[in-house]
Amino acid sequence: MEPRRPKSSNIPKIIGLILGGYALFAALVIAFYDPAPATIADMDWDDRQVFNQNTIATLSLGDGKKQVMEALGAPNFNDAQIIDGVEMQLVRYRTHHVKSDGETTPDECTPLLFVSGKLVGIGDHAVDTYMSNGLPKLQQVSASN
């Protein structure tokens, strides 16, 4: 009778494969996982730009300034004045990248015009058209509130 040969154990090989697979999985997660930012402030510029585009697309004329600014966060540019007792505020949010210079400029932003706390214009053309109509238009908006 021949002596028995000891059986080789596959357990170390199996453990090695499991650990190797886990290490590969962890490396891939670290390399490719890009979690969604928890807040607007945590977004990088391109995520924020897409967020602004999507949020502005849902706005309606007549929306309140507080509601809009809570949805979009702080604007990139903010101009405000009172003309003949009517509060006007023009805010701009970055929505389209133009030049990689590290600066956000007004031409990379979509303007939102508020009169007496209500959204009355979205976009350059709408704001220009509204502004060219002058104060009688502003007084009508103010009187309707």
Image: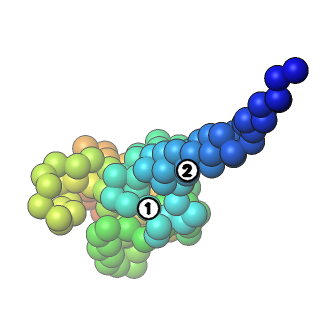
Mark 2 and mark 1: Cα distance apart in space:
29 Å
Q: Crowding at label 2, few (<14), some or many (≥20) Cα neighbours within 10 Å?
A: few
Q: Which residue lies furthest to the front in this view?
A: 1
Residue 105, placed above or below residue 126 = below
Of 28 and 132, nearer the camera is 28
Residue 53, placed above or below residue 109 = above
Answer with the quarter of the image where residue 90 lies: bottom left
Q: Quadrant of the C terminus?
A: bottom right
Secondary structure of the residue carrying numbered label 1: loop
Image position of 14 (left or right of 23): right
**Can residue 74 be seen in the rendering of this structure?**
yes
- Give the amino acid type for the residue marked by disc 2 in the picture: Ala
Q: Which residue is drawn at 12% across and 61% down?
A: 101
Pointer 1 residue: 43
Q: Crowding at label 1, few (<14), some or many (≥20) Cα neighbours within 10 Å?
A: some
**Can residue 141 be seen in the rendering of this structure?**
no
Pointer 2 residue: 23
Q: Which residue lies furthest to the right in this view?
A: 1
